[in-house]
Image (spheres, rainbow, N blue to C red):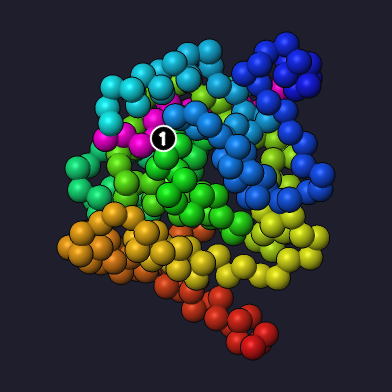
Amino acid sequence: MCQRFAATDRRIAYQRNPENLGAAANYNRVLDRARGRYFKWAAHDDICQPRFLEVCVEVLDNDNSVVLSHAHSEAIDKNGRTLGRYADEPQALETQSWQRFNRLILGRHYCIPVFGVMRTSILEKTARHGNWVGADRNLLAELALYGRIRLVDEVLFQRRHHAESSISKYPDERLRTAWFQGEADSIGSYPTWRRLKEYLRGIRRAPLSARERLFCRAVLLKWLAGRHHTGAHNAALLARELIPMSKTG
């Protein structure tokens, strides 16, 4: 199907990787080939309504402070039946970088905006899409350090839930890490420690003042006491992940 479209429309480029690179490397390979002012990742099973790109691009065109634009979303099943609208969707419109960072790492939300429309030049300055569980949350938080994240008040995106989706197919953290990395046998990724490390790296990379960096690190102290979506405190998860780490040396 892709080859047929590419043959008739010069705007479409088709590339097939010679081997399985893993989800993260595949995401970033697409970004490496990007030439446009704006960029969007697209999963094969999600649906963008016809006006999605038009509306999101209009936001970016009209407000240079916005680095990512997305629309409200609803869940659909494998047959396209609507399951309901997502209530917790993040946007970060604060003027201070640390306030936006605070909202993205402490607020309860699905990471759906990672499939929004982004400024390519800003995305290229970040860690891009990492190969660890929860990397999309790190990416959104880092983008918020560069600018605002805007959520269009219109349902224009449908996220599909089915047995073959990555979350359903790989509920175990070890298996999902292998999916991200393209490895059949992956070691544990210690995701909470990795998220903490990448938050710190993101703060160092971003063009922040010393005061802003200090405030962002203070937000991380709040994050340590906060709860993961599983219900456990992040500090407790960090301590729990030390156990397998000590066994392997």
Left or right of 209? Residue 7 is right
Relative to 44, does residue 96 appear above or below in the rendering? below
Residue found at x 74% / y 55%: 182
Q: Quadrant of the C terminus?
A: bottom right
Magenta region includes residue 55: no
Q: Nearer the viewer, residue 241 or 59?
A: 59
Q: Main secondary structure of the magenta part?
A: strand
Q: Is residue 18 visible?
A: yes
Q: Residue at x 45, y 37 (%)?
A: 120
Residue 31 image position (x, y, % from top left)? 57, 40
Residue 35, how many percent across, how many down? 53, 31
The magenta stretch is 65-80
- Would residue 222 be visible to someone looking at this image? no
Which quadrant is home to the N terminus? top right
**Count of numbered circles on the image:** 1
Write down the residue under mark 1: 119
- Closer-to-camera residue (84/4): 4
Q: For mark 1, does the 10 Å Cα neighbourhood hold few (<14), some (14 to 19), or many (20 or more) residues?
A: many
Residue 110 horizontal side relative to residue 28, left or right: left
Magenta span contains residue 79: yes
Residue situated in front as seen by the camera: 83 or 192: 192
Residue drawn 38% across and 46% down? 143
Name which residue type carries label 1: Arg
Instruction: Say what secondary structure mark 1 lies in.
Output: strand
Q: Is residue 46 above or below residue 134?
A: above
> Which x, y percent locates residue 177?
67, 59
